[in-house]
Amino acid sequence: MISLTDTQKIGMGLTGFGVFFLFFGMILFFDKALLAIGNVLFVAGLAFVIGLERTFRFFFQKHKVKATGFFLGGVFVVLVGWPLIGMIFEIYGFFLLFRGFFPVVVGFIRRVPVLGSLLNLPGIRSTT
């Protein structure tokens, strides 16, 4: 079992609530307030989980400048009050930032009993 410090546990909670508020804000037709709360909680939770210095190093690497610009720009646009445009920017930036992790996540999901069998279906297997 992975041992987490109290700060990392708080970060996991903040990140979880951030994802929940982002999802709930999108379900409720891009509610500005819920999306703004979700963005703040997600970024704060990420900083708590991996630490401030590692968070800054992750976001501000030379080859991730474009991705960071889109992601943080999307957060800013949501906070200003244009949730749909901001979420489009954020999703694009999120994809660019975390695209290196997607193969790892798909490999992990393939080992989960029910989801793994779904990902191994003939039509889906070739795309993932």
Image (cartoon, grey):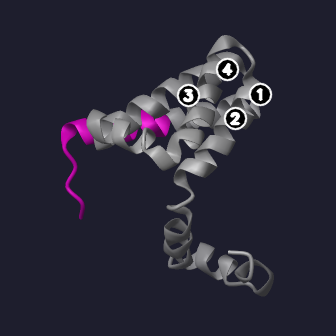
Query: Residue 28 location in percent, x, y?
Result: 76, 28
Per the rendering, the mark at residue 89 is 2
Q: Check the image and report above or below for 41 versus 33.
A: below
Type of the residue with mark 1: Ile
- Mark 3 vs mark 2: in front: 2
Whether residues under marks 1 and 4 lie with C-beta atoms below 8 angstroms apart, the answer is yes
Type of the residue with mark 4: Val
Quadrant where the image shows the C terminus: bottom right
Whether residues under marks 1 and 2 lie with C-beta atoms below 8 angstroms apart, the answer is yes
Q: CA distance from mark 1 to mark 2?
A: 6 Å
Quickly name the residue at label 1.
Answer: 85
Quickly name the residue at label 4.
Answer: 77
Earlier in the chain: of badge 1 and badge 3, it is: 3
Earlier in the chain: of badge 4 and badge 3, it is: 3
Q: The residue tagged with tag 1: helix, strand or loop?
A: helix
Q: Check the image and report above or below for 99 versus 114.
A: above
Per the rendering, the mark at residue 119 is none
Q: CA distance from mark 1 to mark 3?
A: 16 Å
Type of the residue with mark 2: Phe
- Report the residue at 52% width, 66% height from top: 105
Whether residues under marks 4 and 2 lie with C-beta atoms below 8 angstroms apart, the answer is yes
Query: Residue 74 location in percent, x, y?
Result: 64, 28
Secondary structure mostly seen in magenta is helix
- Report the residue at 40% width, 29% height from top: 44
The stretch in magenta equals 1-17
Q: The residue tagged with tag 3: helix, strand or loop?
A: helix
Query: Residue 59 location in percent, x, y?
Result: 44, 40
- Mark 1 vs mark 3: in front: 1
Looking at the image, residue 2 sits to the left or right of residue 66; the answer is left
Looking at the image, residue 124 sits to the left or right of residue 78; the answer is right
Observer able to see residue 30: no
Q: Is 15 contained in the magenta span? A: yes
